[in-house]
Image (tube, rainbow, N blue to C red):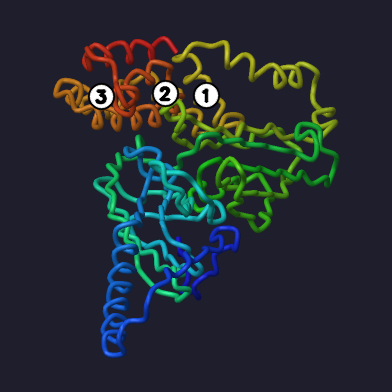
Amino acid sequence: MAGHHHRRPRRVPEAAHPRRVRPPRADGPDPPRGGRSMVMRAFLAWLMLASVALAQGDTRLMILHDHGNPVVSEMVELTIRGEYDLTVSLEDMEFPNSPDYDWIQVARDDWHKERVNGRLLQIFERKVALFPRREGALTVGPIDHKLTFVQDNGQRAETTVTAAPITLGVKPFPTDAPPLSASQLTLTDELSADPGRLQKNEILTRRVTVEALGALAHHLPVRPDLSEPWLILFSQPEHRETVLTEAGPVARVVWEWQLRPRTGEPAILHAEAFSWFDTDSRQIEVAPLKPIPFGFAGFGSNFGASDQGTWRGWPLAVLALGGGIAASLGLMLQGRGLLPAAAIRARIRRLLPGPHARAMRRAAAEGDLPALRDAVDRHLRWRDQRPPALLADLDRQLYAPDPPPGFDAPRWLAAFRRTLRQA
C-alpha cells in the first residue's frame, strides 16, 4: 500500500514546547577588547558543540511492536516513539515503503510531555499498522526523524534522529487460500424477499457485507461467482474500503446481486465459503455463504399432491441417508436437476481415502507440522468438510507462542482421520 508522499515539515503544537527562561548574566568587569573577541569566539564554539551534543546525546527514536511472529497478512501494530530533550518546533518523518509489507497510519501523531528516568522529555508517538506480504525475516526501517528545535539562545537548529531497524519473523499463512487475517470477522447475508416463494417476475436482491477488524480492504476475498444456467443474474459494482476506527482498521466489502430464476422450477443456489485466520484464537475459521432454495409461490399446483409432497420432503430425506445411499441417490437425481453436481462429488469423495493421505502420513512421520497442516487443509477442501475441533491442537503447536510439549503427530493424524469418518 502506498505510504505518505513527500511533504513539508510540520509545525509541532505550541503546547509541546513551552517557553524557556534565560538565566541572568553574571555581573563583572569587562574583559579587554582583544580578549573579548577571543572569549566571544570560544563561547560560540562551545555553544555549537553543546548544541550538537544535545541533539545527539539527549534524543532517542525507537520502533516498537506489539508482537514479532505474525503470519502473512496479520496486522502488527508499530509505535515509532521519540524521546527528545529538545524544544521541537518543526518535524518531518516518512515511513519507508517496501514490497514486503503494506502499511497504514492508524492515528494522528501524538506530542506530549512525559517524565523518563526523572527527566521531563518531549515525546513523539506515531501508530502504524503493518501487514506482511511474505513469510520469512522481514526488516522494517531504519526511520529518520528530521527535527528543527529552538536552542537556549533562541536560535533554531536542525538535527536528524534515526531509529534502528527491527526484524519480524513472519510465518506462512496456515492454508493455501488467499491470506486473510483478522481479530474479528462479520458476514451479513441479506435477502429482499423469501426466495422460495417469489411472485411471477419478482427479482430477488441479495446483499452480502463482509467486515474484518485488523485487515485491509484488498485482503478480503474476491466476489464469489453465483452464476447458474437456470438463473438470470446481474451483479452491482462492489464497494470496498478500509475504515479507521478506535479499535483499529476495519476492511469492508459489499456485494449485491439481482437474481431471478428463468423458470418456476425449484432449484438451489450453491453455497460459497472462504477461510480466514483468527488472530485471537490462532485458528483457521470458515465464513460460509449458505445455499439459497429458489421457487415461485404457487408453483406445482398442476402436479399431483404426491409429487409436490415428495419434493418438499426431499431435502430432509437426503440428510437422513448414509454416505453411500446419499451418493447413489444423488447420482439418480442429477439427471432431474435436483442435486448439484458439486454436492454429488462431495458425497462420493467422503467415501474415498483421498489423494492427500500419503502426504499427511509422510509429514506426520517426519514431524513436519507445516507440511502436515497444508496436507490436512487440502484434504478437507477435497472432501468439502468443515475443519473439526481437533485441528485446534495442531494449530496450537504451529502458532501458539508457547506450544504444549509432547505433541505426537502420527497419533494426532490417526485421531483426525477417525473424526472425519464419524462426521
- Label 2 vs 1, first from the N-terminus: 1
**What residue does disc 1 label?**
330
Q: Residue at x 81, y 32 (%)?
A: 197
Q: Amino acid at mark 3?
A: Ala
Q: Which mark is residue 348?
A: 2
Other residues around mark 3 within 10 Å, as few (<14) / some (14–19) / many (≥20): few
Of residues 53 and 210, which is closer to you in this image?
53
Labelled pair 3, 1 in contact (Cβ < 8 Å): no
User: Which residue is nearer to you in this view: 2 or 6?
Assistant: 6
Q: Quadrant of residue 423?
A: top left
| Kind of residue sitting beneath label 2 | Ile
Q: Is residue 131 left or right of residue 57?
A: right
Label 3's element?
Answer: helix
Circle 3 or circle 1, nearest the eye = 3
Residue at 60 percent of width and 54 percent of height? 240
Q: Nearer the viewer, residue 13 or 246?
A: 13
Q: Secondary structure at mark 2?
A: helix
Residue reaching furthest to the bottom:
34
Near-viewer residue (351 or 136) = 136
**Image position of 309 (left or right of 212):** right
Position of residue 301 measured from the top left corner of the image (x, y, whole percent): 84, 27
The x, y position of residue 281, in whole percent, is 45, 25
Query: According to the image, label 3 marks what residue?
Result: 357
Residue 85 place in picture, x, y as percent: 41, 56
Q: Residue at x 40, y 68 (%)?
A: 146
